[in-house]
Image (spheres, coloured by chain):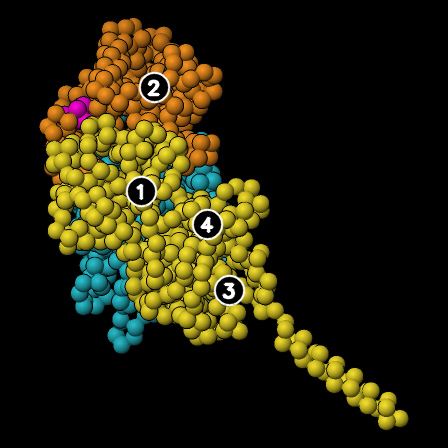
Amino acid sequence: MTKIRLNILALSVALVAGSVSLAGAEPLKVTIGMPAPITGPSANFGDSMVKGAQIAIDQEKNMQVVLNVQDDACDAQQGVNAVNKLITDKVDIVIGFHCSGAALPSLPLLNRARIPVIVSQALHPSITEQGFPGVFRTISTTAQEAPAAVKILSDQWGAKSFALIHDNTAVQKNLLQQKVQLLKDKGGDVVYQTAITPSTTEFGVNVAKIMSLNPDAVFLVLYYPEAAQMTKQLIAAGYKGKILQCVAGVDPNFIKIAGEKVAEQTSFVTQPVTSQFAAAKPFIEAYEAKFNERPGVLAAYTYDAVNVGLAAIHTAGSTDFDKVVAALKAYSGAGVTGKIEFDAKGQLKTGVFTRLVVRNGDFVEP
Amino acid sequence: MLLQLCITGLVLGAFYALIAVGYTVIYGTVRLLNFAHGDMYMLGAFVGFTALMMVPGSPASILPIVAGITATVVAIAFAGFVVRVVLERIDSKNDVFSPIIAAVGISLVFQNSALHIWGTKPLAFPVQLEQDFTKPLITLAVALLMILAVDLWVSRSRFGMAMRAVGIDHNAVRLMGIRVDRVLYVTFAVFSAIAGVTGFLAGAYYGSIQFSMGFLLGLKGFTAAVLGGIGNVRGALLGGFLLGMIEAFGGGAFGTNWTDVIVFSCLIFVLLVKPTGILGETVVERM
Amino acid sequence: MRSRQFPIWIFLAIVAIAIPVSGNGYYLSVGTTVLIFAVLAVGLNVVLGYAGLLDLGYVAFFAIGSYVTAMLLYYTELPFLLAFILSGITAGLFGMLVGAPTLRLRTDYLAIVTIGFGEIVRIVATNLDITGGPTGLYGLRQPVVGSYTITEPIAYYWIALGMLMVGLSFSAMIRRTKLGAAWAYIRYDEEVAQAVGINPFLVKLSAYGLGAIWGGFAGSIYVVSVGAISPTSFTFGQSLLIVMSVVLGGQGSLLGVVVGTLCVIAIPEAFRAAESWRLLGFGIALIALMLWRPTGLIRDRFKVDAPSNPAQSGVPSVTTGARHAEG
């Protein structure tokens, strides 16, 4: 009799212990809200953002993750609507944003809703400068790009006089202003600084001015269509100085529009693109296997952002705002884009920039 | 620098003049601005692009270029014809604005169709003019020849007379036995085709084309037509080149981000001071 | 109110009240956007629907009003109500300035000039640093009315709805005045109207000016509801959307304008479908409308069909008063 009772007791204890541990091991359910430009001019960036995130989610083993994508159409009003939808849908964390214009007005809303945010592709410094406690970013900003560009222009090339042109869009103008400041601080002479209208193809006026002022170097803070045109026209006019492009110039179509001969005569300062990170190879392979196309130039940054977000939630053990934010603040790890650590304002500490050139129709290290 | 600015002004002027001619003659015949004219320019560039890509052999040789231009002319002439057919059905309705709003609708349809067919990203044009001093010269020569041809046609030929007569009084012309509808079909077709070829030229000149290229150019082409005197072919020529110069030198003086403001302010200014334009043509209030 | 329209108004009113009551943040946000657009459409309706002026750059006044309020909130400590009033006045002044030379022109000229003006405003706002340049201004302080600071999105919804109600009532009322009648007459036949002593230019200017002031007020409310401003919100495309709301819904008809706004803004938002398909659809819709139903979906009760375009006959005839059967 005693033996049976003992056995029953043992069995019940085992059962209770088993069910308790089972309850504790139940996977955490996490919903990631992703505001991305699905329509509009930046649609291809939004598309690769979503796909990059998907790869990270597929690889996540510890938690059940759901992705809720909302279109911000790269517009402030639509961005606010998209974020409101995410807040109403009660997402646990927001990861994404490509257009700074859509991100900036949305951040106060997310702050009030106490949802942590990891920005993965938008570059305007104000996103983290504003100092919202729950906002982090896994990509370097224009504030970090400027010093890298200036290093190339002044130190590497030894240029003393400069012409800078932007296209009157928010991030580009900001980048240009930072660079101008830095160049002036170094004693450089900014002889020509102006803006062009996007979508124009005739740059004769700018070329004329540059030829007459003849600066040592020209920095084009333009998207690839205008950058390619302007570079082509400058070189055709006989400009002999150095020409530097910014991140937005890095696109295969630049080479097509400017022509290989012209493209080989200019350099690009940029965050490394996905294909350059050695650590990104498995990511690229997984992406190609699943989607049958190469990942977009910024997809790796979103991939890292999702991994960082999920890791922080895992460390925190819950989706509670304070715990997750604390985990993010303390985060230190290696993503495929490099070391990821955040400063006091939530900005990625180490901004990595490099100079690329065009050889054999592709962007490579010089 | 002055020389460079002049050349830029002339090249811009050539394109503006070519577009302005279309606006001005169509206005002269139907007393309405063809809102979709700028899109004919854009479509010409894209149709040309596709035609060039489809013809086998290196795009830069004679056969593909001729084929490309021919395809452009035919396609855009047809597009212009279609536009006129649609507008014709609307003209007989009540409102003065219906044809204008319909033209805006047509413009939207063309632009967004182009967007879906060819994508949002700028495309590299397969044929590009040699990057040297011959570029502006060739462009200017082509533009001047085309406009001269148009001027002769409109002022000397019988068809030209028919066009001008239609512009004065539809009913009287009908009574005299001229098929007004046919005259208008041809007018729209021909001038749309001219805009289309201008688009092809722009593709070859600049090397890249984009679905939005027609919008701003259309507005500036209209401005040039008004500047020179609407309804007047030589006015279009003059207005086009003048506007090109204003844009080049204005951009040089004030900065290239102000050029569009300068151009549109010019438009408002001209309408304020001399609405008939430099060479003049009556702008009758006909509400 | 005509009995056929009444039930539709009731339905709209129910929807309008259900949204804030539901507490759904997303619907509230979209609802506020739709309401502000409707306010703009009501303003354009006076210009286009009543007075027959084809303004394709109406967004300019919206932009002017928005920027005036944004700059005052950003750079000064002036109270919001003052900024609101100044926004309307400034927009109205610009309306007069632009209207004076251009309202004497033909419809198609007016159309292109108004597009040009819209572009000028947008480009100037993008170029100047004081307007925040391409980034715009953000983090604007919230309006304070009395001792009450307006922070909740739901408050903005009610404000926008209130503004729409005011706009609708004002439009209905002004239509019945002598000025309203004058607008209808010049639209019908300007020469005859002139013969009976109406000054077409002043009458048109009053419509244009009123529309401008109204657009300015709408801009002021818009800015505080978003808390930020950027020049990318004020493109030609936006002007087109407002024009479409008025034209599609029914020029002149107030119910039409509201329904038109719903069709143009709310439905695509509900599907969040690709923007370019939407524009393509609109282009086709405009053409179809002009071919078969140029007056728009909802018939304007007061409207009398204008005579056939005198330009067609080439000769200004004495009998231009000929009416066509309504259809």
If the image is split into quadrants, where does the N terminus of chain A sit?
Answer: bottom right
Q: Secondary structure at mark 3?
A: helix
Q: Position of residue B94 (x, y in %)?
A: 37, 31
Q: CA distance from mark 1 to mark 2?
A: 36 Å
The label number, if any, that marks residue A278 in the structure image: 4
Subunit of mark 1?
Answer: A
Colour assigned to chain B in the rendering is orange
B210 in relation to C152, above or below: above
Residue occupying image coordinates x 50% and y 69%: A313
Q: Secondary structure at mark 2?
A: helix
Q: Answer with mark 4 or mark 1, whichever residue precedes in sequence.
A: 1
Q: Which residue is mark 3?
A: A310
Q: Which residue is mark 2?
A: B197
Q: CA distance from mark 3 to mark 4?
A: 23 Å
What is the three-letter code of the residue carrying label 1?
Answer: Phe
Q: CA distance from mark 3 to mark 2?
A: 56 Å
How crowded pointer 3 is (Cα within 10 Å; few <14, some 14-19, many 20+) is rated as: many
Q: Position of residue A37 (x, y in %)?
A: 43, 49
What is the three-letter code of the residue carrying label 3?
Answer: Leu
Q: CA distance from mark 4 to mark 2?
A: 49 Å
The label number, if any, that marks residue A183 in the structure image: none
Residues at discs 3 and 1 in contact (Cβ within 8 Å) = no
Q: Secondary structure at mark 4?
A: helix
Colour assigned to chain C in the rendering is cyan
Provide the residue span drawn in magenta: B6-10
Q: Secondary structure at mark 1?
A: strand
Please identify the quarter of the rendering in which residue C104 is found.
top left
Residue occupying image coordinates x 27% and y 30%: A232
What is the three-letter code of the residue carrying label 2?
Answer: Val
